Image (cartoon, rainbow, N blue to C red):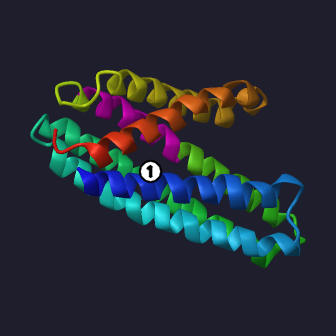
């Protein structure tokens, strides 16, 4: 359990650092040569997140297969598919420094964001399955509904960004539920002695 909590902590810290502290500020006012080091560090932070995510997918499967093997396997596959999509997006984003000053750089940034959103749709479905898997365990009662709500936010937010981007800003506050849920899950995993 603590291994899962440690991996989750790495995912939270590296993922938020990549997006909010490094990439977000670099891309806010248009990318300049001075922003390239932050962009490259965001790629590294995301890579750390992905490696931890793959490890967590396997650890969760091993922990939860005794609850329902088919659902645990589906959750693992969805989490791994999400990691693959986000990894593909990182390849696109890594091309931005090579295309600085051209019309291709903003396209690569947008394609990366789209890949991330597609991955978050899969992660949203993973959250819905994880909510079911944690119900019969000793997880805090509130965790399953929080995971289900977060899954709906990830799915709805990503679909909105892909299909109706003008509405994305209205959904963004709902992501606070996702941050709270993942932090709660991480803390429980770090402190728990078993399912």
Q: Is residue 164 left or right of residue 144?
A: right
User: Could you tell me if residue 57 is visible in this image?
Assistant: no
Q: Position of residue 3 (x, y in %)?
A: 27, 57
* Span of residues in magenta: 119-132
**Residue sitting at the far left:** 66
45 over 147 or under it: above or below: below
User: Which residue is more in the foreground, 69 or 136?
Assistant: 136
Q: Main secondary structure of the magenta part?
A: helix
Residue indicated by mark 1? 82
Q: Does the segment drawn in magenta span residue 72? A: no
Q: Is residue 81 left or right of residue 115?
A: left
176 over 75 or under it: above or below: above
Residue 68 lies in quadrant: top left
Residue pictured at 86% horizontal, 74% vertical = 34
Give the number of marks: 1
Q: Position of residue 5 (x, y in %)?
A: 33, 51
Quarter holding the C terminus is: top left
Q: Is residue 162 left or right of residue 104?
A: left
Residue pictured at 82% horizontal, 69% vertical = 35
């Amino acid at each position: 359990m603590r291994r899962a909590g440690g991996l989750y902590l790495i995912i939270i810290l590296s993922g938020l650092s990549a997006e909010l502290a490094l990439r977000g500020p670099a891309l806010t006012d248009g990318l300049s040569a001075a922003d390239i080091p932050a962009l490259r560090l965001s790629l590294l932070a995301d890579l750390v997140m992905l490696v931890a995510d793959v490890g967590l997918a396997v650890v969760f499967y091993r922990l939860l297969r005794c609850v329902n093997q088919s659902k645990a396997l589906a959750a693992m596959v969805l989490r791994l598919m999400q990691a693959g999509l986000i990894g593909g997006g990182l390849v696109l984003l890594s091309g931005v420094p090579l295309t600085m000053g051209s019309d291709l750089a903003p396209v690569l940034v947008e394609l990366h964001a789209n890949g991330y959103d597609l991955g978050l749709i899969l992660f949203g479905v993973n959250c819905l399955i994880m909510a079911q898997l944690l119900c019969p365990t000793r997880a805090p009662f509130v965790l399953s509904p929080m995971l289900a709500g977060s899954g709906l936010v990830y799915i709805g937010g990503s679909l909105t960004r892909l299909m109706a981007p003008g509405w994305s800003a209205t959904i963004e506050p709902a992501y606070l539920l996702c941050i709270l849920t993942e932090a709660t899950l991480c803390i429980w995993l770090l402190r728990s002695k078993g399912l």
